[in-house]
Image (tube, helix red, strand yellow):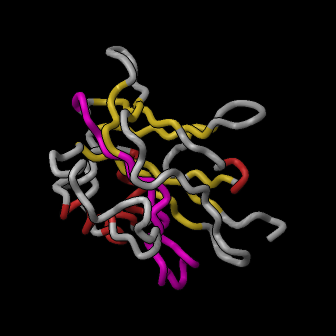
Amino acid sequence: SEVKRVFDQAHIPGNISLTFNPKALLEVTFPEPVGKSIVLHAGIQLPRNATAGPPNFRVVGSAGRGPFVVAAVDLDAPTPQTPTSAQIRHFLGGNFFFESRNSLLLTNTTPALSQFRQPTPPAGSDPHRYVFLLFEQSTAFNGQTLVTPATSIANFNISQFAGAVGLGQPIGGTFMLVGPDPSA
């Protein structure tokens, strides 16, 4: 698939230590205060001000019925050249289901473990890769205690978390590039 090819070109599977063979397309949309919403295409570069969020999630393809887990991580903090704080957890939520029987839109039935955090690469940094991943939710997810609202978002490891709570490999995903504000 095109998303897999772009993920591979950006070295994402190796950087997150997960196999990426998507069976569904995770579509991430950022509503904008003025104008049309922005739908991510894998590898798109967006200005920071277009990513205030929170985003909406849709699934296209054979993903099953849910529940699902959606995670978003910054692989390049504080800079792509020295990612010493990576991964930064920008979103982690479970209990996502299709909004209705014929809808592709996901809605979560419980609060996210980590609410969406807008990308904020530091001044002088090259653009960061912000990766969104879709997992089939395991039965262990709701009872996990590795991530709570009080857990640091820095130095998160999505592959270790996915392994520890039985999420397996992602079934879909996308990513965007976001650089610092031009005025920064």
179 vs 32, nearest the viewer: 32
135 vs 171, nearest the viewer: 135
Q: Is residue 162 left or right of residue 99?
A: left
145 vs 132, nearest the viewer: 145
Q: Residue at x 61, y 56 (%)?
A: 118
Where is residue 159? Give x, y as percent: 27, 65
Q: Residue at x 24, y 48 (%)?
A: 142
Q: Residue at x 29, y 40 (%)?
A: 68
Q: Quadrant of residue 157?
A: bottom left
Specify whether residue 75 is painted magenta: yes
Span shown in magenta: 64-93
Q: Quadrant of residue 144?
A: bottom left
Task: Let me know if residue 15 appears in the view.
Answer: yes
Task: Let me know if residue 172 appears in the view.
Answer: no
Q: Is residue 132 left or right of residue 38?
A: left
117 vs 61, nearest the viewer: 117
Where is residue 42? Give x, y as percent: 49, 49
Q: Quadrant of residue 184?
A: bottom right
Where is residue 137? Give x, y as percent: 23, 44
Where is residue 174? Give x, y as percent: 44, 49
Report the number of numbered marks.
Answer: 0
Specify whether residue 2 is painted magenta: no
Q: Residue at x 39, y 64 (%)?
A: 12
Farthest residue to the front: give it.
150
Q: Is residue 55 left or right of residue 15?
A: right
Farthest residue to the right: give it.
183
Quadrant of image for the N terminus: top left
